[in-house]
């Protein structure tokens, strides 16, 4: 791969990864979708960095889980929905009236997308 293209994939991967890390502490910003995007970009720009992300003890499991099952655990869907509702209410309280609906509209679109994805059943430990 030519270096400009490779560097663009790397830049997109790092930007997605940093955005996902910021999403850990900011309630309106989702973490996992940005980790998935980062892994996808790294797979095109640097298999070594992709492998690092996949093997990371905290960041890797959601990406590996998505790749192997293409489904979202029910608890993750429920938690994300509660956080989006809380974030939308908080935004409605602090934003000007003309803009207070925007976070709720985006969160609603994300929630619809999220709940349309297959739900992964919990792994039994019999």
Image: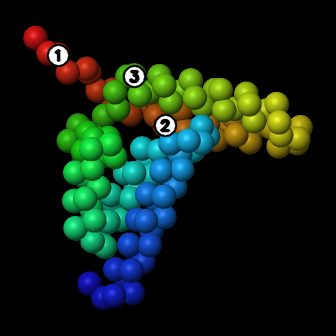
Pick the quarter of the image with the N terminus. Answer: bottom left
Judged from this view, the residue extending furthest toward the left is 126
Q: Where is mark 1, residue-wise?
A: 124
**In which quadrant of the rendered view does residue 76 lie?**
top left
Q: Where is mark 3, residue-wise?
A: 75
In the rendered structure, the answer to whether residue 13 lies left or right of residue 56 reads right
Pick the quarter of the image with the C terminus. Answer: top left
Q: Where is residue 121 in the image (x, y as percent from the top left)?
A: 26, 21
Q: What colour scheme was applied to this rendering of the protein?
A: rainbow
Q: Where is residue 98 in the image (x, y as percent from the top left)?
A: 88, 42
Q: What element carries label 1?
A: loop
Q: Which of marks 2 and 3 is in front?
A: 3
Q: Which residue is drawn at 69% across and 32% down?
A: 88
**In which quadrant of the rendered view does residue 103 lie?**
top right
In the rendered structure, the answer to whether residue 112 lies left or right of residue 116 reads right
**In which quadrant of the rendered view does residue 47 lie?**
bottom left
In the rendered structure, the answer to whether residue 45 lies left or right of residue 16 reads left
Q: Where is residue 41 in the image (x, y as percent from the top left)?
A: 36, 65
Q: Which of marks 1 and 2 is in front?
A: 1
Which numbered dot is residue 53?
A: none
Judged from this view, the residue extending furthest toward the right is 97
């Amino acid at each position: 791969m030519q270096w400009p293209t490779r560097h663009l994939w790397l830049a997109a991967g790092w930007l997605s990864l940093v955005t996902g890390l910021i999403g850990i502490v900011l309630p309106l910003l989702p973490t996992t979708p940005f980790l998935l995007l980062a892994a996808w970009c790294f797979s095109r720009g640097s298999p070594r960095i992709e492998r690092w992300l996949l093997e990371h003890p905290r960041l890797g499991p959601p990406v590996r889980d998505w790749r192997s099952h293409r489904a979202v655990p029910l608890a993750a869907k429920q938690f994300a929905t509660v956080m989006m509702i809380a974030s939308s209410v908080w935004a409605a309280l602090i934003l000007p009236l003309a803009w207070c609906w925007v976070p709720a509209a985006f969160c609603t679109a994300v929630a619809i997308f999220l709940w349309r994805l297959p739900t992964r059943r919990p792994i039994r430990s019999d």
